Image (tube, rainbow, N blue to C red):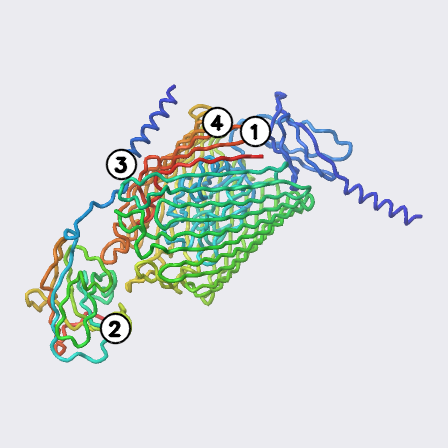
Amino acid sequence: MKKFLIALMLISSVYNFAQTSSIKGKVITDKNEILEGVNVIVVGTQYGAASMRNGSFEIRNIPYGEYTLEVSMIGFAKKNLSISFDSETKPLIIVLTEEAIQTEQIIVSASKYEQKVQDLTVSTAIISSDFISRNNFLTFDDMLRKVPGVQMNLEQPSIRGSSGYSKGTGARVLVAVNGIPIYSGDTGEIVWELIPTADIERVEIIKGPASSLYGSTAIGGVINILTRSNVKNSITHFRSYIGMYDKPAYDFWKWDDAMRNFYGLEITHSGTAEKLGYTFSFKKFDNMSYRQNDYAKRYLGYMKLNYDINLQDRLTFFADYLNMNRGNFLYWKDSRNALVPKDEDNGNTVESNRFLTGLIYHHYFSKDFYAELKSSFYYTKFDGRGIELTTSTANLFRNELLTNIILSNNVVLTSGIEASYSKISSNIFQSPKFFGAGVYSQIEFKGITNLIASIGLRYDYMKLDSLNNANAVTPKLGFNYKAAKDFILRASFGTGFRAPTPSEVFNTTTVTGGFKIIGNTNLSAETSMSVEAGCNYQPDKLFSLDVSAYLTNYNNYIEPNLTKNAEIQFINVPKARIEGIEVGSNFYLVPDLVSVNLGYNFMWARNLSNDKFLKYRPQHSFNSQVRITPFPFDIGIDFRYMSRIDEIDDLITQPPIALVVDGDKRVPIYVTDLSFGYNFLMESVPAKIYLNAKNIFNYNYVEFIGNIAPIRNYSVSLELFF
Amino acid sequence: MYKTFLLLIICCMLYFISGCDKGIEPEPEKSPESEIIGFRGKVTFTGNWPAGITRTHIVVFKNEIKSVDDFSFQNLAFVVDSIPYKSQEFIYNSVMNNFFSFTLADGTYKYIVVAQSKTPSISLNRDDWFIVGVYYNNGDKSKPGTMTLQKGKITTGIDVNVDFNNPPPQPPK
């Protein structure tokens, strides 16, 4: 009988432990006004909800116990509430008070832990999903061209001059999806088409070396793409666009009488079934291009699963597959045939297949101790058909364990360990293997009034096939000081490094004109040391101004070079320096109706070995975006300017080689885009339609020698949410 | 009101800045004759050809070779097609006999030679080449001759005499 009672008590206690219910409540202001869209999060768990139109919220499936609720909304002081949750708990009434400082409470996680954007010690740009939808960007990299301080040289990103152009080989900006890098195992390039734009919540861009957290490749900065969280109700997002290129500016540039068009179709479905959140997406997007042999045919499949195991544990799994067939336009024939490739390149094609999959396990040990284990696998294969068949298959495995510990109210410790391994099978990169491992730690300290100090250190070990192993230690230090309610000062010191990629070390292939690329097994890792000082002034939510000055010194900078034997080889440029000033401002000309974003960057990028400009770096760049939003309309005027590039690859544009005829033709860049959007209901289904006209003045410019950038084009896109 | 006015000014500025020119302009159409740049001449050989020669070229350098580093692709301007082994005379024209598909620019070239190699494939290693003849201006053998090229013109008389029994001074190795 005694045993039976004990068993009954145990069953009862287990039953009690497993009992769950909903935390309910309502959020109002101190003036008794209802607040919609307030985030209510159970601290130390995956659970949370947003308040609805009547101010009420409900967080379901919460076991009885002691919890802390974090309640936050832009423009209101954040509130933490300790509650004892049981069957007797009544719906909560939470009162928020307006905050004196009307700063944007945007949370960013590019520093591998969540912080407010105004607490950062380095310059950062945030791009919302709305911005992507409004501009009908055909691929993700189109969007980056509109970010001040970010330059695209064809498909290669450069943050504050970190990169020139090397035909997709090696990147100096780390691009990650939910913190998982997406550079390929062989060339180290970023394939922008692989990014699932429909699932993007926001994009965070760190402008400056971030190797102390992210290791190699992040020497120039980080672009971290955050995907959406689970949705409460299932939703299907349909997006389609169709567009066409206008006639070229000169009649004799016209090489095809048919209309050159582009189109895309994307359908994404997201939902939640009990503890499982899911997203499935399929996209087909083709582009005939305005240039001959520059077409692209692409299919993208994407899925993401979030499984809430319990309050403390969550699993995220995603898989991304891209198939792409495209022409390979290398250089124009000459300036009179600017949209036609050289005869020997016409007909060159590339077929590629890429598969990226990742598994992320999140675990809360307590509300002050969080860990994340990330594993990923990235398969890439391409077959290039041109002068010779080039083929490469790379398998890249990556694992990272990340922990965030709140040591006290004022100290947050972020630490991690990661390892990656890649195996390449190629007829141009000599089939090498690569192993890299890193360990890092960063402390954020808030113990002094109005001051946030951040210090970090990372150690990396790299071994590329038979080459000697390499080591790198990359420290960083940053300060953020709120000098006044509306004025923030920041300063940072950072170091970076980049290991040469297998393609830079082992590449042996023949490119156009019969020129050979040869390997360089003596190539060293490049390193950098960077300082930045900046300030942010934001008196109210209608105006903000951000100014920063930066300086980066590079050692052993890796650049392609023409050898005395007329072969292209990657070499180390002993010393280079990039310094500059960036100014950005956002303001409303008419509150809630006309907003303006302006950004200007002055850059002085020098190769100190020969006292020349670094190649493909403009001295001045300017971006502006004017947005007029009289609901239900949304009108945008975007303008982009970049001064004429000072230095290019003269050796391949000048006699005797003159590989690119008229290749020295380059001009300042002036591009103006227009967008016109209309929000409406289609049979009670929310819908958006956008008309876009890009490069409306049909201005002809190059980002890289012998490659005319997209000419004037028009498109219409339709989005439905049901 | 003034804000709307400011916006209008910005839009007008954009229009004028962007719309005033079309950016990159194509080169004007040129007649093939006006674009032609080249040279021609004759190479004569005296004495017996050495054994094992795999290639003999007329090579044009931008500047004299004063150090081994000057024997480089950056200093190279033109290479004429290979002269057949044991030739006694070779008449050439740079337009017809362009070995590397090089493009010549107008200007002055300061070192024109006939060079031989015994390697199976062409190399730019200084050790692989032996200079057997040098172009001189008006027979002045005290220094290498210079050649000036102009657009729309084929410069003639770039003749070199190769005397296998009396080779010219060799550039530094």
Structural distance between the alpha carbons of marks 3 and 1: 46 Å
Query: Within 10 Å of the Cα at label 1, are there few (<14), some (14-19), or many (20+) other Cα atoms?
Result: few
Residue occupied by mark 1: A683
- Secondary structure state at the residue bearing disc 4: strand
Question: Looking at the image, is mark 2 or mark 3 nearer the viewer?
Answer: 3
Disc 2 crowd, CA 10 A, few/some/many (<14, 14-19, 20+): few
User: Which is in the foreground here, disc 4 or disc 1?
Assistant: 1
Along the polypeptide, which appears first: circle 4 or circle 1?
4
Q: Earlier in the sequence, mark 2 or mark 3?
A: 3
Q: Which residue is mark 4?
A: A540
Q: Locate residue B124 relative to residue A510 in the image: left or right.
A: left
Foreground tag (3 vs 4): 3
Q: Amino acid at mark 4?
A: Asp
For discs 2 and 1, the disc positioned in front in the rendered view: 1
Host chain of mark 3: B
From the image, tell me which residue sits under label 3: B21
User: Where is mark 2, residue-wise?
Assistant: B128
Q: Quadrant of residue A388?
A: bottom left
Confirm whether circles 2 and 3 share one chain.
Answer: yes
Label 2 vs label 4, nearer the camera: 2
Q: Crowding at label 4, few (<14), some or many (≥20) Cα neighbours within 10 Å?
A: some
State the residue at coordinates (57%, 52%). A358
